Image: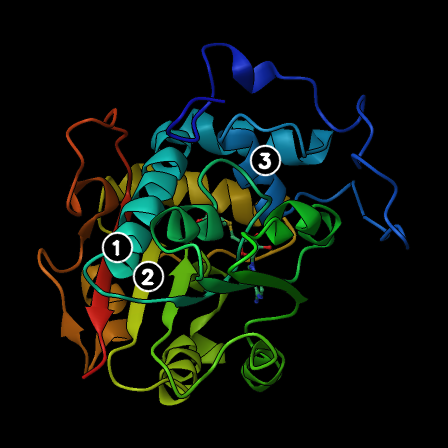
Amino acid sequence: MTSDGGPQAGELGAKPLDDAPLYDEPAEEPPSFDVSVAHQARIYNYWLGGMDNYAADRKAAEAAVAAYPGVATGARANRQFLARAVRLQAGEGGIRQFLDIGTGIPTASNTHEVAQSIAPESRIVYADYDPVVLAHARALLSSTDEGRTDYLNADLRDTDAILEQAARTLDFSQPVGIMLIAILHAIEDAEDPCAIVTRLLDAVPAGSYLTVSHPASDIDADKIAAATARLNQLSHQHFTLRDHAGVSRFFTGLELLEPGVVRVENWRPDPREPVNLSAMWGGVARKD
Ligand SMILES: C[S@@+](CC[C@H](N)C(=O)[O-])C[C@H]1O[C@@H](n2cnc3c(N)ncnc32)[C@H](O)[C@@H]1O
């Protein structure tokens, strides 16, 4: 794994889960996995060069890459965006609490590592509904002594349950950085993702932030549509692409930070980082 969360050359063939033990240490209650159907967290892990994936995940991931190689570079661009957005909030934004929903399998520069490198007292709650992420949650609980982290095995659509459990760790009278990084495409229009975002924002005070990244329907449109069709055929979840206007809608009523909703690699790029191209919209906004 490279410092930008991407694979080393040739690492996409890294030793995968089928051949490797699933856990560093045995979990108390091993979750049951249906390894015959691809899952988003494990597909994404494969694109990042990780080893926490199975043959079905790799098949779906490779099928998508064959249609559009930008899905794999986009995964790396998205991780870089996450780290830059957290750095901004923890730095000039003064945010000391984060709620990161759709965490994914731990990789380099997880939200708590970035935030606590700036403010060791930061508190972070992670939530994801994938059993493989749960199995690796221990890596997300490596908090500094001054700070705290927690992991919720929870579904974003059960927003109230997430907010209730997150309150064990976060003080909702103080600003919170809500991170919805590459998750809202897993919520179909019929499930009203804007209403979910609104419920989260209603629970946090002024001074809080919302960060969203989302696969685009209007960047390299034909290719990403073809890649998404393959993912939808081969994986457990349904992926919904959204255009620039659709992603911007999640920030309605908030003060969108410059440069607005842009391709994630173009959001306040760090010239020291390698450039990875994506077909993903991303932005950060503040609640006033
Ligand atoms: C593409 S990964 C993104 C991981 C991480 N946020 C990042 O950007 O690096 C999407 C993650 O969202 C999770 N996810 C999708 N739908 C979800 C839901 N309804 N509730 C909780 N987690 C969900 C998946 O299990 C997966 O781990």
Image coordinates of residue 236 in percent, x first then y, are: 65, 53
Front: mark 1 or 3: 1
The disc, 2 or 3, on the residue closer to the chain's N-terminal end is: 3
The colour mode here is rainbow
* Residue at the disc numbered 2: 212
Q: Nearer the viewer, residue 120 or 192?
A: 120
Q: Is mark 2 within 8 Å of ligand 1?
A: no
Image coordinates of residue 257 in percent, x first then y, are: 13, 64
Image coordinates of residue 23 in percent, x first then y, are: 80, 37
The disc, 1 or 3, on the residue closer to the chain's N-terminal end is: 3
**Separation of residues labelled 2 and 3 (CA atoms):** 24 Å
* Residue at the disc numbered 3: 60
Q: Nearer the viewer, residue 110 or 16?
A: 110
Residue 215 seen: no
Q: Residue furthest front?
A: 146
**Separation of residues labelled 2 and 1 (CA atoms):** 6 Å
The residue at the point 39 percent across, 46 percent down is 117
**Separation of residues labelled 1 and 3 (CA atoms):** 24 Å
* Residue at the disc numbered 1: 282
In this rendering, position of residue 38 left or right of residue 224: right
Regarding mark 2 in the picture, which secondary structure is present there? Answer: strand
In this rendering, position of residue 48 left or right of residue 139: left
Q: Is mark 1 within 8 Å of ligand 1?
A: no
Residue 29 is labelled as none
CA neighbours of label 3 inside 10 A, class few (<14), some (14 to 19), many (20+): many
As displayed, is residue 9 above or below residue 266? above
The residue at the point 28 percent across, 42 percent down is 279
Regarding mark 1 in the picture, which secondary structure is present there? Answer: strand
Look at the numbered discs 2 and 3 and tell me whether their residues touch, using CB distance below 8 Å. Answer: no
Front: mark 2 or 3: 2
In this rendering, position of residue 234 left or right of residue 86: right
